[in-house]
Amino acid sequence: MLAPKKVKHRKMQKGRSRGRTFSSSKTELSFGSFGLKSLEIGWITSRQIEAARRAITHSLKKGGKIWIRIFPDKPITVKSAEVPMGGGKGTVSHYVAVVRVGTILFEIDGVSEERAKTAFTRASHKLPIKTKFVVKK
């Protein structure tokens, strides 16, 4: 699964999503002809990215090329069970990618539009946010 090799700060603050903020980067298809675009704000874990990638790869059956446009670089900490309040921040449990509205999550090239659409439909079922199929103009 995806995780950063080295980070400057091991733990990070949670942050807040203020309303329906739109993404300013990664909004256009750069590599492939077809893409999966987010319609909501959310956190996507490295496990969910890997599950979606596997679903895409499985439905393409050795055809086409896939690009993953998001990377989980935000650490999420969890305190262990039955630990009293205080005692500091918990250990890093997993990493998430912060996704805004309009971010391209995955791209595909080298397959038909129908095949790409089925692949992205299967991948979207693995993700916690609503997505949309986009085609390069």
Image (spheres, rainbow, N blue to C red):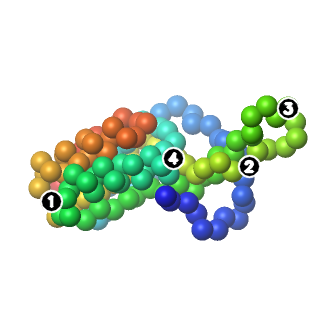
Residue 43 position, x and y percent, is: 52, 42
Query: What is the distance, in whole Å, between disc 4 and disc 2 at their CAs?
Result: 16 Å
> Which circle's residue, 2 or 3, is located before the other in the chain?
3
- Within 10 angstroms of label 4, few (less than 14), some, or many (20 or more) residues? many
Q: Is residue 126 left or right of residue 32?
A: right
* Distance from the alpha carbon under mark 2 to that under mark 3: 15 Å
- Residue 111 image label: 1
Q: Which residue is mark 3?
A: 84
Classify 105 as above or below 65: above
| Residue placed under numbered mark 4 in the picture | 45
Residue type at tag 1: Val
Instruction: Assess whether mark 1 and mark 4 are in contact (beta carbons under 8 angstroms).
Output: no
Q: Please, which residue is most extreme toward the front here? A: 82
102, 95: nearer the viewer: 95
Q: Nearer the viewer, mark 1 or mark 2?
A: 2
Image disc number at residue 97:
none
Residue ranking furthest to the right: 87
Q: Which mark is residue 91?
A: 2
Q: Amino acid at mark 4?
A: Thr
**Residue shown at 33% from the left, 62% from the top:** 67
Q: Earlier in the sequence, mark 3 or mark 1?
A: 3
Q: Answer yes or no: do the residues labelled 3 and 1 have beta carbons within 8 Å?
A: no
| Residue closer to the observer: 52 or 97 | 52
